[in-house]
Image (spheres, rainbow, N blue to C red):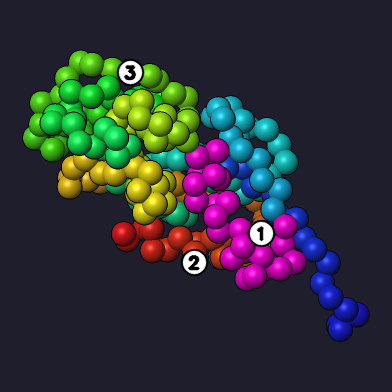
Amino acid sequence: ELFEPRAVQTVSIRVPISFALLLLVPMLPDLAEALPRIQLDLVTIHRPTDYDLPGSALDIRFGNGSFPGREADRLTAERLVPVASPALAGAADWTALPLLLVAGAREMWAEWFAAAGLAGHPQRSHRFDSFVAALEAASAGAGVLLGSRPLVDAALKNRSLVPLSDFELSSTSGHFLTKASTARLTSAEQDFRQWLLRHLSGEISA
């Protein structure tokens, strides 16, 4: 038995859809190479109540790190910067463009304008219930998004979005890998946890 290959082990995890599509999915080839006997059962989260469903010891949550009854390890430190499509980037005054809104913890345009020392304006455009939908709208030229780094880093790198300011607002919020305080992780879950923390360690200090 010592020389037989270990069986494939499944790790179930709940993840916000924006984190899943923009950060975790691009890392899956590295996961396959680093942990070839682990397969993910990935469930995307759309509403906070989705976390209450049974079946997963691990989940990734967005917030300030305080999740009652759960241990949390920080994965990302959020930094907010206005971004838009290249077609809108040449506007003489980008603050007069429609501002895209995301429902929930990221609705921070007022804070960004205040911290940047700029006057905000009441003009608003479309409102989205997920960051990834708002990101697609910004890429399509629908308006200016308060981009959450590192979630927008790939779009900035491929120039589908460009920053409109050098000022980034650092936030206490970010993504955290969490588990119930009383939960005991399997060896596969522990391996996945260590791999994810190691892979994203640079995003915490960036």
**Left or right, residue 89 beside residue 145:** left
Q: Residues within 10 Å of mark 2 (few under 14, many from 20)?
A: few
Q: Position of residue 11 (x, y in %)?
A: 70, 54
Q: Disc number at residue 189?
A: 1
Residue at the spot x=23%, y=16% of the render? 123
Residues drawn in magenta: 16-39
Instruction: Say above or below: 29 vs 120.
Output: below
Query: Circle 3 is placed at which residue position?
Result: 125
Query: Circle 2 is placed at which residue position?
Result: 198
Q: Find residue 103 and report its image quarter.
A: top left
Q: Residues within 10 Å of mark 3 (few under 14, many from 20)?
A: few
Looking at marks 2 and 1 on the same chain, the residue that comes earlier in the sequence is marked by 1
Q: Position of residue 129 (x, y in %)?
A: 47, 25
Judged by depth in the image, the label closer to the viewer, 2 or 3, is 3
Indicate yes or no whether the magenta region holds residue 185.
Answer: no
- Position of the C terminus, as image quadrant, is bottom left
- Position of the N terminus, as image quadrant, is bottom right
For the residues marked 2 and 3, what is the alpha-carbon distance in whole angstroms?
39 Å
Looking at marks 1 and 3 on the same chain, the residue that comes earlier in the sequence is marked by 3
At label 2, the amino acid type is: Arg
For the residues marked 1 and 3, what is the alpha-carbon distance in whole angstroms?
42 Å
The residue nearer to you, when weighing 144 against 32, is: 144
For the residues marked 2 and 1, what is the alpha-carbon distance in whole angstroms?
14 Å
At label 3, the amino acid type is: Ser
Looking at marks 2 and 3 on the same chain, the residue that comes earlier in the sequence is marked by 3
